[in-house]
Amino acid sequence: MLYIILQKEVTKDTMKNNDKTKSLSPLNRSTRQQAKRRKQRKKKWGLILLGFVAAAGLLSFIFRKEIMLFGFDHVVAPTVAETLDQSYVSLDGNHTPDNDEAVSRDENAPFSLLLLGTDQRKNENGLSDSIIYTVVRPKDDKALFVSIPRDSYAAIIGADKVKGARSETKINAAHSYGGPQMSVDTVENLLDAPIDYFATINFHGLVDVVDALGGVKLPITKVIENKNPAHEKLRIEPNKPIYSGEEALMYVRYREDSDFKRTERQRIFLKAVLDRMKNINNIMSIKDIMGIAGENFKTNMKADFMLDLAKLVIFENGTPEITSHMLQGTDKRTDQWYYILDEDDVQQTHDLIELWLNPDTEESALTAADSGEAATE
């Protein structure tokens, strides 16, 4: 009985709705039907848009490398090239790249690079606090870092042409006497090895560059602090996820443990910067970063060469596997403290460099050559 009553009520409601629909004028019925069709179209286009966004997101993930590469080639490179050209300085002092000069080197061939970190101020050359002879093997995705302690006692090539310069003294004086040219000549003489390129970075510009990268990751597990009152005050707290430019500068300049540890920190820092540069946000900010570097960065590498190398590191091979070595020696005091290099180690380092510069050297031979203080990072 209850079921029959309910059925009657439902039938009444349905009849009422039908009567209401019938009571609508033709114009109202048409308006309602149009609104319904618009709602259906909106739903349809919403689903299409959602599908498009999902597909675009999926494709951007799958082809992330290709999208970044396109951005690098068409957005970053054209604007950065001009800035890099402004950093160009040839060893003869020419500040303009010679566009007519033929570039004959194979992009996969090994090449050597002298990295110099200076404390240059204004128009002075400044001492080279960091001296790293580098061999890069693009084909093998490997790099050799040979650190030369700044206090190494060495013959300064070209010192006889500079008034007041000493012909034999700490190797870092070469840059203060005659800039990159004298540093290159002196290191080539010391190691009996060629230098294809040089690059100098002023430590005073390092702070802003690192900050522009959003800081760097450094393996600091205990407090680093200068305790000698004669040294500049510095203190770095350990176990921070990211370190600022100011902290990075203190990290590479701290020297109250040993020259070996100091040069090791410099190599670690360089690798940390390379790793940080691969962040997509930093890739798109290269122009700003290079603008910050400005006068603090000088090199005789052409813009095209550096951009091709950067693209190889960022998009193809990744951060190179770095093999590190510091020239060995002993401390000795005469008129001041010097680091007297071990002649046997210098010769062995020369042999190692020759091996790395030889394009025919097999990768396995490079690994077998790593011994003693050499270490892969």
Image (spheres, rainbow, N blue to C red):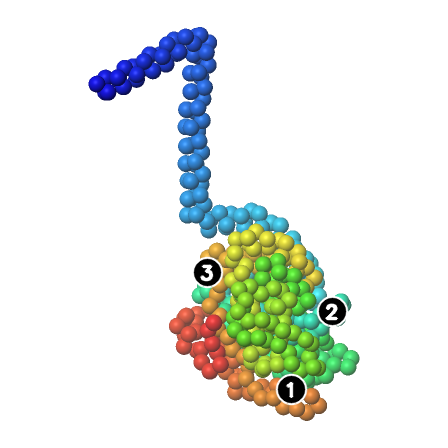
Q: Secondary structure at mark 2?
A: loop
The residue depicted at 57 percent of the width and 75 percent of the height is 223
Return the residue nearer the eye: 105 or 1: 1
Question: N-terminal of the two: label 1 or label 2?
Answer: 2
Which label was assigned to residue 338? 1
> x, y (%) of residue 340?
60, 87
Q: Is residue 182 left or right of residue 31?
A: right
Residue furthest to the front in view is 1
Residue type at the position of mark 2: Arg
Measure how far apart labels 1 and 2 are at the Cα level: 25 Å
SS label for mark 3: helix
**Which numbered circle lies on residue 317?**
3
Q: In the rendered view, does 310 fall on the left or right side of 165?
A: left
Q: Is residue 208 left or right of residue 191?
A: right
Kindly identify which residue carries mark 2: 121
Label 2 vs label 3, nearer the camera: 2
Name the residue type under label 1. Tyr
Q: Is residue 217 above or below residue 12?
A: below
Q: Nearer the viewer, residue 265 or 185?
A: 265
Label pair 3/1, CB-CB below 8 angstroms: no
Q: In the image as oriented, which residue stretches furthest toward the bottom?
A: 334
Specify few, some or many for label 2: CA neighbours under 10 Å numbering under 14, 14-19, or 20 or more: few
Q: Residue at x 39, y 72 (%)?
A: 364
Instruction: State the image coordinates of residue 299 (x, y, percent, origin top left).
Output: 64, 64
x%, y% of residue 290?
63, 57
